Amino acid sequence: MQELDKIWMNGELIDWADAKVHVGTHGLHYGSGVFEGIRAYETPRGSAVFRLTDHLQRLHNSARLLNMELGYTIDELRSACMDLIGSNGVPECYLRPIAFYGYGELGVAATGNPIDVVIMSWPWGTYLGAEGMEKGIRAKISSWTRIGPNVIPHVAKATGIYLNSMLAVMEANRAGYDEAILLTDEGYIADGSGENLFLVKDGTIYTPDLSASILPGITRDTIIQIAQDLGYTVVEKQLIRTDLYLADEVFMTGTAAEVTPLRDVDDQPIGPPGPVTLAVQKAYLDTVRGQSERWAHWLEYATTEPARAQA
Ligand code: PPE
């Protein structure tokens, strides 16, 4: 991770090296935290954060599901993100707000522990490699099952959930694949370790519906809207693994992964990135980089760069 100058922690911008917690922190012992992953892009009008308010709204929802009181409004967190981008001076970066039960009492019930709220930012290149973005990655169905809706609320982007993702992606990597695909207990396709999944069959786009224990991805929502605008039909439904094997195209979406094509699943060839994937990927990258008037309202410009914003 490339270290930048500042981290926003509990209301203040502090030096990167000083953003520390005690080893007795509740969130460290029990994974009791919620977080977000957000990207800021360099655009012709300066640094813009993609769907920042939507990400912060999801952070608030995640916190609610874990009975956490963040203590900062969405507006306050939005300003904090903008201040951080301005002070670090890196217009194109990944933002990682995280809130967790802090240092107080140990014991599983977190009631009474303080809540720490932190925002980090650092430059993060392509998640699954530049070559993966261009030529497609190789994925494997995981032997790990995606956590069910009555295990941990999957709608929450909660830190503890990511043990599920970590085991899956490490298993896939050890076996020589780039990414894992997790199925639900019933065998329906859920998501990747850090991405939602889409497939294309006979010109129609399919993606698992929200009941499949998936994170309600903001990129997923973006892609559904962009694809419909491009004239594609998008169907949200239960999908099974053989739908992937027989698909014409498969791609994954996420803030970090953006739109990454899959070139094979379980060694079943899907082929090089197809026309629908490429069209959607281009439209997405144009949108986040401020090249699209249609979706301009999704870009929240860092107010800390007034000189550039006027240009
Ligand atoms: N599913 C999972 C399990 C997931 O972690 C992500 C985001 C998504 C779907 C897509 O969500 P969205 O970013 O809102 O479109 N994964 C984040 C964290 C990746 C990491 O390694 O850390 C991300 O993409 O920022």
Image (cartoon, helix red, strand yellow):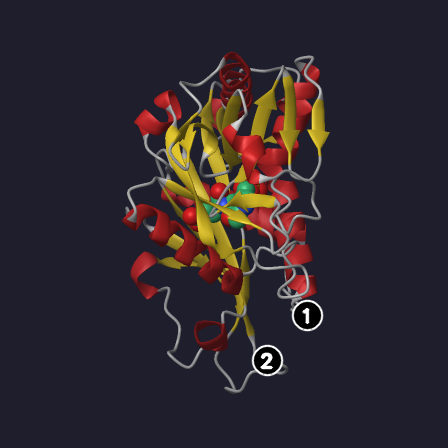
Graded by Cα atoms within 10 Å as few (under 14), some (14 to 19) or many (20 or more), the crowding at tag 2 reads many
Name the amino acid, label 2: Ala
- Residue 119: x and y in percent read 47, 54
Graded by Cα atoms within 10 Å as few (under 14), some (14 to 19) or many (20 or more), the crowding at tag 1 reads few
- Tag of residue 164: none
- Residue 184: x and y in percent read 60, 52
Name the image quarter holding residue 206: top right
Pointer 2 residue: 110
Q: Residue at x 50, y 21 (%)?
A: 281
Q: Nearer the viewer, residue 80 or 227?
A: 227
Queried on whether the Cβ of the residue with tag 1 lies below 8 angstroms from ligand 1, the answer reads no
Q: Is residue 199 left or right of residue 162?
A: right
- Residue 274: x and y in percent read 48, 15
Where disc 1 sits, the SS reads: loop
Q: Residue at x 61, y 48 (%)?
A: 214
Q: Is residue 174 above or below residue 234?
A: below
Inspect this view and state whether residue 127 appears. yes
Q: Mark 1 touching mark 2, by CB under 8 A?
A: yes
Marks 1 and 2, how far apart in space?
9 Å
Q: Mark 1 or mark 2, which has the lower sequence index?
A: 1
Where disc 2 sits, the SS reads: loop
Pointer 1 residue: 67
Inspect this view and state whether residue 11 appears. no
Q: Residue at x 52, y 18 (%)?
A: 286
- Residue 222: x and y in percent read 63, 30
Name the amino acid, label 1: Asn
